[in-house]
Amino acid sequence: MFLLDAGARAAEVCAVDLDDIDLRVGSVLVRNGKGRKPRTVFLGKKSKRALRAYLKSRTKDNNAEEEVALWVINTQSRPTYWGLNQILRRRAEEVDIEKPTPHDFRGAFVLNFLRNGGDIYSLQKLMGHIDLQVHRRHLAQTY
């Protein structure tokens, strides 16, 4: 749900630190977006609720990486792009659907944002795009 709500790139999601989130507002600071430009993305109510539950379920093992990273896998390290892909593959198999790619969630975010009345310039800022040509590619892939 985090991927869909935030519209962030997979590597950006994997790199989120605990200090980057504000659950009161639902904002997430993406420190190193494409081109090393920071930006803020936002989460919906369901994602904030799920994130709170996830944070309550985490245990402390005094691992430095675990104390900093938002997402920690069972080896007590950050997930990688490939690890995230494997999570998506397993979840897709569980519900018997074709595996989406992490980038599919960005395309769905674009489409949902525009269908719900969002404007193209706010979308550009949320996605971290320099120009509108990239939006056109997202929309062309979606339709």
Image (cartoon, helix red, strand yellow):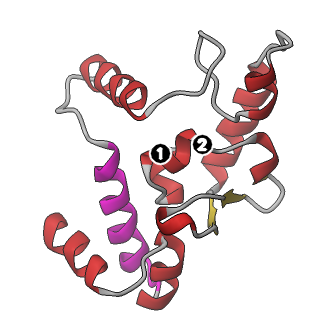
Q: Is residue 64 left or right of residue 103?
A: right
Q: Position of residue 93 (x, y in %)?
A: 25, 19
Query: What's under tag 1, amino acid-wise?
Result: Ala
**Residue at image x 82%, y 27%?**
67
The stretch of residues the image draws in magenta is 102-118
Query: Does 26 appear above or below 121?
Result: above
Mark linked to residue 124: none
Q: Position of residue 19 (x, y in %)?
A: 82, 47
**Residue at image x 63%, y 58%?**
30
Check disc 2 and report its element: helix, strand or loop.
loop
Q: Mark 1 points at which residue?
A: 11
Q: In this view, does 36 lie to the left or right of 130?
A: right
Q: In which quarter of the image is the C terminus?
A: bottom left
Task: Give whichever of 29, 24 is nearer the camera.
Answer: 29
Q: Where is residue 15 in the image (x, y as percent from the top left)?
A: 60, 42
Check disc 1 and report its element: helix, strand or loop.
helix
Q: Is residue 114 magenta?
A: yes
Q: Mark 2 points at which residue?
A: 15
**Residue at image x 66%, y 14%?**
76
Q: Is residue 33 left or right of residue 92?
A: right
